[in-house]
Amino acid sequence: MEISFRETNERMARFEKAISEAGVKKTIQRLEIFREIASSVDHPDVETVYERVRERLPTVSLDTVYRTMWMLLDLGLISTLGASRDRTRFDANMENHHHFVCSRCGLTRDFYSEELDGIKIPESVKDFGSINKAHLEVVGICKQCAAKPKPIAQKEDTS
Amino acid sequence: MEISFRETNERMARFEKAISEAGVKKTIQRLEIFREIASSVDHPDVETVYERVRERLPTVSLDTVYRTMWMLLDLGLISTLGASRDRTRFDANMENHHHFVCSRCGLTRDFYSEELDGIKIPESVKDFGSINKAHLEVVGICKQCAAKPKPIAQKEDTS
DNA sequence: CTGACTGCAAAGGGTTTGCAGTGCT
DNA sequence: AGCACTGCAAACCCTTTGCAGTCAG
């Protein structure tokens, strides 16, 4: 499965715009890296993007892909799955529950809602596979982080 | 904020039961590591669990905490946040959407639902902080993994 | 032209593994 | 007593960083 031609084009246009507005240079590497992520549906990791881009641009280096991904994130052109957590975190709460996650510091808290537990998942999702559970991930800024000024252009930390 | 005394006790009872049913040894380390995660609300990472357990059990080693966490996961006593992904994965889809995630292989696919986009988040969640967005994470087993037999007692891979 | 960007190689940091000693059942 | 488990240290792998050459604006 591929992203539609039209959608890919729209994403590329957004890229051009963001790049020029941010005043950063438009290099072949950045273009190809963004084109790769913009045209894939599988949410690849850095290594995967690297391998795919290398087919067209054999000289790219892995660290350029890393640098570019964080840059694209800063420009708001892409996002990370799971609120950009780094280390694995664990949960001993085995009941049905949902999460509030702070996108700034990674703080995660449980909340409960019977209404949400009974949520209706579209039939089409079953095309992907069998469903075990579902939970809502609410992303925001926790009170503690809101009190502090936002760090400028840095990878959000997860302390 | 702490987990209630009653709830912690229930979790400890589940631990005893699972440990003996699995026929693995009940060591001080495992007990204290599970007690720690079972009584915390903040979904700590391995390092954090390590530091906290070390206050009571100064000789535990970091690798024992790692080994124990994976064991608890195998026993179904805990789970990981964000479907146990390891490396960071990226998403160029900036529209409102939701995810289906295979807990076996990490395959992730988008799906859309206007009904879900308009979901009602409990007022109480605002006590944690401001809300930017929310999306449903549906966890299951993808068709490809369902066709293969499940690997025995291994950390799920995310290829 | 000139500073931002890339590629390389080396460093850094989190996680895993082999092994000998320890302790649970 | 036997064997699983722990602690230690080294290995491993993913990610970041310093630097000199290169290239977009």
Image (cartoon, coloured by chain):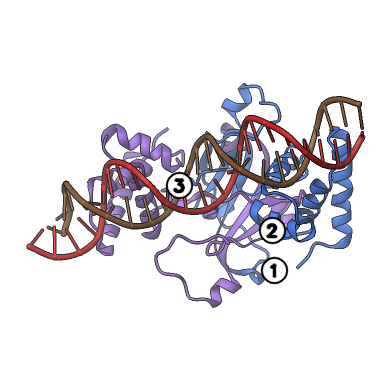
Chain colours: A blue, B purple, C brown, D red
Which residue carries the number 1 mark?
A124
Whole-percent x and y of residue D11? 42, 51
For badge 2, the amino acid type reads: Glu
Task: Give the spatial CA distance, label 1 vs label 2.
Answer: 31 Å
x 86%, y 32%: residue: A23
* Labels 3 and 1: the sequence-earlier one: 3
Residue B14 left/right relative to A20: left
Checking the image for residue A90, the label placed there is 3
Chain hosting mark 3: A
Using the rendered image, report if marks 2 and 3 lie on a common chain. yes
Depicted A143 relative to depicted B31: above or below: above
Compared across the picture, whether A80 is left or right of B68 comes to: right
Mark nearer the viewer, 1 or 2 = 2
Pointer 1 or 2: first along the chain: 2
- The residue mark sitting in front, 2 or 3, is 2
The amino acid type, in three-letter code, at marker 3 is: Phe
Q: Helix, strand or loop at disc 1?
A: helix
**Residue located at (42% from left, 37% from top):** B48
Res B7 visible:
no
Q: Are marks 1 and 2 in contact (CB under 8 Å)?
A: no
Q: Callout 1 environment at 10 Å: few (<14), some (14 to 19), or many (20+)? A: few
Residue highlighted by disc 2:
A51
